[in-house]
C-alpha cells in the first residue's frame, strides 16, 4: 500500500472534561475547565484521556477532532477580523500543514519522534452557531466545509505539540489546508 508523508506541526491540543457550548449562544458559554497541554494520552476506541468525549458510546467514531490552523487564518482573512483563537473552536488537535478533508474514511497516523497514534477519519466536523458568539460574527458560515475531521483513535499513544509527520494513504495538498470543501448540491 502506498503512503504519503507530510511534515506538520501540532500547534494546539485541547482537553476539556465538560461541554462549554450548549444551550443558546446568546446566554454565553459555560465556565468549564479546559486545558491546552503539551502532551495528551490517546486510548484506542475511547479518545483523549480527560476529554468530554472519552469513552462515550455516541462519540466512539468521532472522539478526536483534527482541525487545520490555516482554515481559521483564512476565515479571519475573509472576515477581516484579525487573528482568531483556535482553542475557542474546541477542536482537540490543531495542525498546521495538513489538508484534512480527503482523510474522511481513511486511516492516518500522526508520528512525533518515537510516539505515534493511528486514527480513522470518520466524518467532517461541522461548525455550530457558537462559532459566531465565541470567535466573531460570520465564523459559523465561513467555517462550513473546513471545520475539521472527527476521528476514531485506533491505537494507544501520545500526541505532543510540536513537529510531527502525518502519514496518509491518500495524497494531500497542504496548500489547500485552509480551503473550504463544498459538496455539490443535487439538482
Image (cartoon, grey):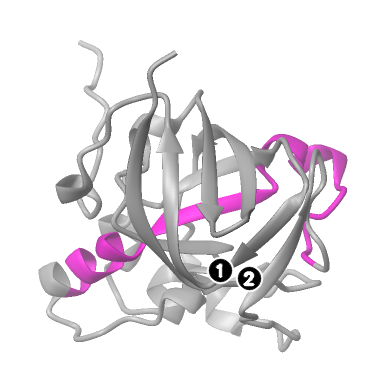
Task: Residue 169 in the image: state x and y as whole percent.
Answer: 42, 24
Q: Quadrant of residue 131?
A: bottom left
Disc 2 to disc 1: CB gap under 8 Å: yes
Q: In percent of the image, x 32 and y 81: which residue is there?
A: 84
Q: In percent of the image, x 72 and y 35: which residue is there?
A: 154
Task: Residue 111 in the image: state x and y as whole percent.
Answer: 53, 51
Give the structural element (helix, strand or loop) at label 1: loop
Task: Residue 10 in the image: state x and y as whole percent.
Answer: 46, 66
Q: Which quadrant of the figure contains the N terminus?
A: top left
Q: Left or right of 10: which side holds 50?
A: right
Q: In percent of the image, x 45 and y 59: which residue is there?
A: 164
Badge 1 local density, few (<14 within 10 Å), some, or many (20+)? many
Q: Is residue 74 magenta?
A: yes
Res 144 visible: no
Residue highlighted by disc 1: 90
Alpha-carbon distance for marks 2 and 1? 9 Å
Q: Magenta segment, which residues?
A: 51-76
Amino acid at each position: 500500500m502506498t503512503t504519503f508523508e507530510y511534515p506538520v506541526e501540532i500547534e494546539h491540543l485541547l482537553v476539556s472534561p465538560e461541554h462549554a457550548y450548549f444551550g443558546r449562544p446568546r446566554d454565553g458559554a459555560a465556565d468549564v475547565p479546559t486545558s491546552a497541554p503539551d502532551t495528551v494520552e490517546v486510548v484506542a476506541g475511547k479518545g483523549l484521556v480527560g476529554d468530554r468525549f472519552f469513552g462515550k458510546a455516541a462519540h466512539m467514531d468521532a472522539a478526536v477532532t483534527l482541525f487545520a490552523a490555516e482554515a481559521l487564518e483564512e476565515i479571519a482573512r475573509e472576515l477581516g477580523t484579525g487573528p482568531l483563537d483556535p482553542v475557542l473552536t474546541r477542536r482537540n488537535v490543531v495542525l498546521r500543514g495538513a489538508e484534512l478533508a480527503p482523510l474522511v474514511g481513511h486511516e492516518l497516523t500522526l508520528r512525533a519522534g518515537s510516539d505515534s497514534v493511528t486514527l480513522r477519519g470518520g466524518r467532517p466536523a461541522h461548525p455550530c452557531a457558537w462559532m459566531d458568539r465565541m470567535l466573531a460574527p460570520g465564523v459559523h458560515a465561513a467555517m462550513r466545509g473546513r471545520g475539521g475531521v472527527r476521528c476514531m483513535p485506533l491505537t494507544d499513544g501520545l500526541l505532543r505539540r510540536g513537529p510531527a509527520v502525518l502519514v496518509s494513504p491518500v495524497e494531500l495538498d497542504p496548500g489547500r489546508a485552509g480551503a473550504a470543501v463544498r459538496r455539490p448540491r443535487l439538482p
